[in-house]
Image (spheres, rainbow, N blue to C red):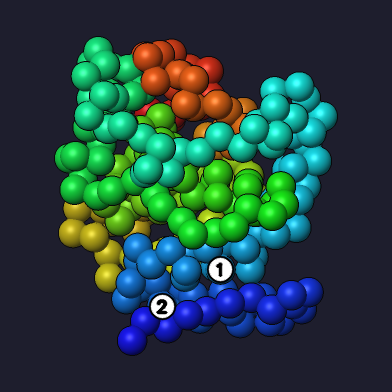
Amino acid sequence: MTQTLSLPENASLFTRLSVARQCLKALRKDPTNPNYGQVFNQSLNGNLYATLAQILRRSEEGRRLLTERPSLQGKELDLAALERLPEGTLGHALARYFQQNKISPFETTLELKTDVDYISKRYRETHDLLHVLTGYGTDVVGEMELQAYVLGNLRLRTAALVLTNGTVHHFKEPQADVGRSEYLQRVWAAFQRGRVSPRFLGFRFEEHWSTPVATLRARLCAPAQA
């Protein structure tokens, strides 16, 4: 039977870390489980999301995002229609990304009571879009590059924890084609790239399906180091 994890209200830092570790352990066995992902995210990032909400509220576009709360969940995406868009556009690239990686868009049962809940959801449902924009792969090292990018861009503790665990695992069992030195260079470059890029979390991706990926990459991502 699937285990259900939850975060107690007003949990202490110790409890949050303990729950996060339990979620991370559970996610290794069941990486697509929505409960584990939601609780892991909230246990470490709640106060950071609150700060991001305050920042978004300072701009008209940010206030509109938090008021309208647009969704990028799977049930909101018509992948067949997106794939019919011209090659090179964001919508076409995202549809092909899901098809090529044999995965489905993010879904959640999280009830959105607050801005923090919404930003938590928004972050998780932009994960695949960020792969498309940054160009980082979905292999083990590519995922760690994306976590490093997010750490630099948003300072999320979940990204730091996943990156730390992934790095320890890589050093114990390096990927055949990526040595330790190259791995460290790549994740450090990704961190620096995320640090100097605009925050992506407040961007209305759903209004730009017909925009070329190259245009959005230039707008939202600093150039990748050669």
* Residue in view at x 46 percent, y 38 percent: 72
* Residue in view at x 64 percent, y 75 percent: 7
* Residue 89: image location, x then y, percent: 32, 17
Q: Amino acid at mark 1?
A: Val
On the picture, is 177 further left or further right than 147?
left
Q: Nearer the viewer, residue 57 or 107?
A: 107
User: Which of the 4 image quadrants contains residue 167?
Assistant: bottom left
Q: Secondary structure at mark 1?
A: helix
* Residue 155: image location, x then y, percent: 64, 50
User: Which of the 4 image quadrants contains residue 13?
Assistant: bottom right
Q: Secondary structure at mark 2?
A: helix
Query: In the drawing, what numbered circle is on residue 92?
Result: none
Q: Nearer the viewer, residue 206 or 111?
A: 111
Q: Amino acid at mark 2?
A: Ala
* Residue 91: image location, x then y, percent: 33, 24
The mark that comes first in sequence, 1 or 2, is: 2
Query: In the drawing, what numbered circle is on residue 26?
Result: 2
Quarter placement of the C terminus = top left
Q: Is residue 213 visible?
A: no
Q: Is residue 126 visible?
A: yes
Quarter placement of the N terminus = bottom left
Outermost residue, bottom side? 1
Question: Which residue is disc 1 drawn over?
Answer: 39
Tag 1 and tag 2, C-beta contact below 8 Å: no
On the picture, is 85 further left or further right than 14?
left
* Residue in view at x 48 percent, y 64 percent: 37
Bin the neighbour count of mark 2 within 10 Å (Cα to Cα): few under 14, some 14-19, many 20 and up: some
* Residue in view at x 62 percent, y 28 percent: 198
User: Which of the 4 image quadrants contains residue 96?
Assistant: top left
